[in-house]
Image (cartoon, rainbow, N blue to C red):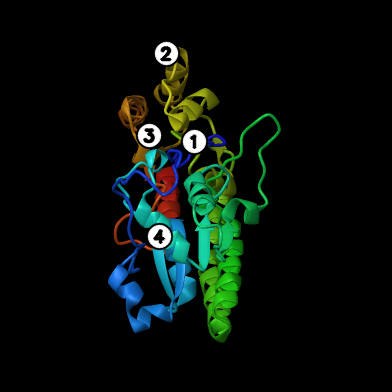
Amino acid sequence: MPAPSLRLLAPVIAGTCLVCLAGCGGSSGSGGADNDAAQSPAATSLVPVVASTNVYGDIAERIGGGKVQVTSVISDPDQDPHSYEANTQNQLALSKAKVVIENGGGYDDFIDRMLKSGDGDSSADVINAVKLSGKTAPAGGELNEHVWYDFPTVAKLADGIAAALAKADPADAATFTENAKGFKDKLRPLEQKEARIKADHGGERVAITEPVPLYMLQAAGLKNATPEEFSEAIEEGDDVSARTLQETLAQFTGKKVKALVYNEQTSGPQTEKAEQAAKAAGIPVVPVTETLPHGKDYLGWMTANVDALASALAK
C-alpha cells in the first residue's frame, strides 16, 4: 500500500468508556486477557505484555519463552484492522502491562489513546516498531507503516523486546537475549529467499491492492506498477475513480505485471474487480493479510508469503 496512514483507525476514547467490538483476545498461543490466569500464582510471575496485533504478540511470545503473558488486542484474521474499536478489556490489560508493543506510524493510534486515558501511572516500556525501523516518509509521499513485512526491522524489534523484558524481569535477561538471537537466526532464511527472488526476477513489475506487502516486494527487487491513486483510495476506504480503476485493470488485461499481491483482509468491490481481471488474464494472485492467520506463527506465516510470491513469479 502506498504510505498508509489509515491503519487501524480507532474511535476517540472518552474516559474509560470504550466501544466493545469483536477482535480482542490473546495472541496465538497466549492466554490473552484471562482474569483467572492473571490472578493465579503462576501467572503473577509472568511479565504482562500487550501487543496491538497478534503479529507482535507472537514475536513477543517467541522471545519471552514462557516467561510472559501476552495479550494481543487484535487477533481475529477475519477482522479489518482499519475499523478496529478498542474496549475496556483492552484498557485493563494495558493498565497492567510492563511491556507494550505498538506498530506506530498512525497504524494503531488507539494504543496511545488508551495509554493516555489511563491513570497516568503506567510504568510500561512502550516499543514503537516504526520508530525502531528508522523509516520515514519519502519526499512528497506518505510513510509505509507496515514494517512487520520488513525483516531487518523485525530483527531490531526482537532486540527491543528482549531489552524491555530484561528490564521487567532481570533474572531471565539471558533467556530473552538468547531467544531473540534464535529468532533473528530464523529470519535470515527469509531474507535469503527475498535475495533469490531478486536475483531471478529483479525489475519485474507486480500489482498490489494496498501497500501492506511493499517492503517485502522491494526487498525482492520488484517494481510496484499499481497507480498510486488506486492503492491510496483502497487503503483509505475511499472510492476509486473510474479512470484510475481502468488504469489499474489495464495492468492485467495488458499483462504488464507478473502477479497481483492482494490484501484479502480488506477486500471490496473494486479490489475484487482487480482480482478477477488478474485471474482472467492468467496472472497469479498472491493473497496476504495484516494479522496472523489462525494456526500460524510469524515465521511460518512470512515463509508462506515469500514462497507464494516466488512461486507466482516462476509461473
Residue 193 place in picture, x, y as percent? 51, 58
Task: Look at discs 4 and 1 and give the one toward the viewer.
Answer: 4
- Label 2 belongs to which residue? 242
- On residue 260, the disc is none
Distance from label 1 to label 3 (Cα)? 28 Å
Question: Can you tell which of label 3 and label 2 is closer to the viewer?
Answer: 2
**Label 3: which secondary element:** loop
Among the two numbered marks 4 and 1 on one chain, the one whose residue lies closer to the N terminus: 1
Of residues 107 and 306, the one drawn nearer to the viewer in this rendering: 107
Which residue is tagged 4? Answer: 92
Mark nearer the viewer, 3 or 4: 4
Q: Which disc is residue 6 wearing?
A: 1
Relative image position of residue 261 (x, y in whole percent): 42, 39
Mark 3 lies on residue: 283
Q: Residue 146: horizontal and vertical position, in percent?
A: 52, 46
Left or right of 189, for residue 18 = left
